[in-house]
Amino acid sequence: MNTRGYDPLLLAGKIVTIIMQAAAGFGAAVVALVLPAVALFKEDIVKGMAETSKIPVQDLPMAPLIGLLAIVLLFLAAMFVFFGKLRAIIATVGEGDPFVPANADRLSLMAWLMLGVQALSWPLATFAMTVAEWAQRHSDGDLSIGSGRDVFSLSGILMVLVLFILARVFRQGAAMRDDLEGTV
Amino acid sequence: MVKLDDLLYARRMTLTELAERVGLTLANLSILKTGKAKAIRFSTLAAICRELECQPGDLLAYEGSDT
C-alpha cells in the first residue's frame, strides 16, 4: 500500500525528526568545538574567568566539567543517529514498504543507542552534581543549579525494551513479506 | 512447472486479458508464467482454471530434479 498521499502523522513525524536531528547535530558540533578548547586551555580559561568574575574559579572542577561535556557530546551524537534512523523508517512507511530487513537493523541500532544513553546517565548525573555543588557553594544565593541523582528512568528502560522487541517484530515481518512477495 | 503459454494459446487469450479476468496484475501473472512464483493461492488457481476452462493439473506439472 503506497501512502504517498497526505498523511499528517507521517508528515509530523518527518518534521519532528528533522528538527530533532538538526538540533542534536548543531549541539554536538558546538560541544565538539568547545570540549577540546576547554580541555587544552583550561588554565587560561580559569585565569580569564578569575579576572572578570566575582566568583572564585580557582577550584572550578574542570575534570568533571570536561567529563560532562564529553558525555553530552556522546548523548547528542547518539540522538543525531537515533533521529536519522527514525526518519529513514518513517520514509519507508510513506513508501508503503516498512517491513524490510533494513528497518529491523535500524530499530536494533536505536535500541542499543538508547541503552547507551541510559548507561551514560549515571556518570552524567555524577559530573553534573559535582559542578552544581561547586556553583551552589559560590553562588551566594544568586545562582541555584539543580541536579538530581535520580538517574533511574523507567520510561527509558521501557523504551529500550520496546525498541528491541519492535526490531524482532520487523525482522519477522520482513521474512513474512519476503514469503508473500512470491505469492500470486 | 507452469504450462500457461499452451493454455493461453489454445484459448486464444493474451496474458493481459487473463490478468484482467482473474484480477491479478500483469506483473504477478508474468511471475507465475515464468515459474518464479513461490506460492499460488487457491483463489488464484481457481480463477485461472475458470477462465481457461481447465483443471489444475493442466496448468501445473511437477518436474523433479535428477539426483
Image (tube, coloured by chain):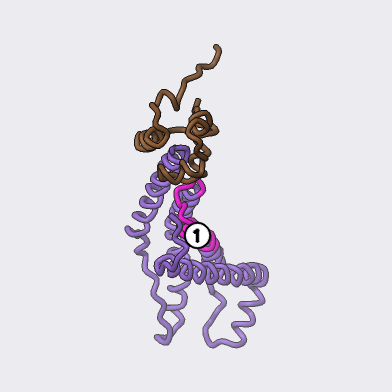
Chain assigned purple: A
Which chain's residue wears label 1? A
Q: Is residue A25 left or right of residue A100?
A: right
Magenta extent: A77-102
Q: Is residue A56 left or right of residue A42?
A: left
Does residue A119 lie above or below A16 as drawn? above
Residue A32's spot in the image, x, y percent? 62, 67
- Quadrant (top left/top right/bottom left/bottom right) for the N terminus of chain A: bottom left
- Number of numbered markers: 1
The residue at 45%/68% (across/down) is A11
Whether residue A139 appears in magenta in the rendering, the answer is no
Chain assigned brown: B
The residue at 33%/59% (across/down) is A155
Prevailing secondary structure class for the magenta stretch in the rendered image: helix
Question: Which amino acid, mark 1?
Answer: Ala
Whether residue A94 appears in magenta in the rendering, the answer is yes
In this rendered view, identify the residue nearer to me: A21 or A112.
Answer: A21
In this rendered view, identify the residue nearer to me: A128 or A160.
Answer: A160
The residue at 50%/38% (across/down) is B13
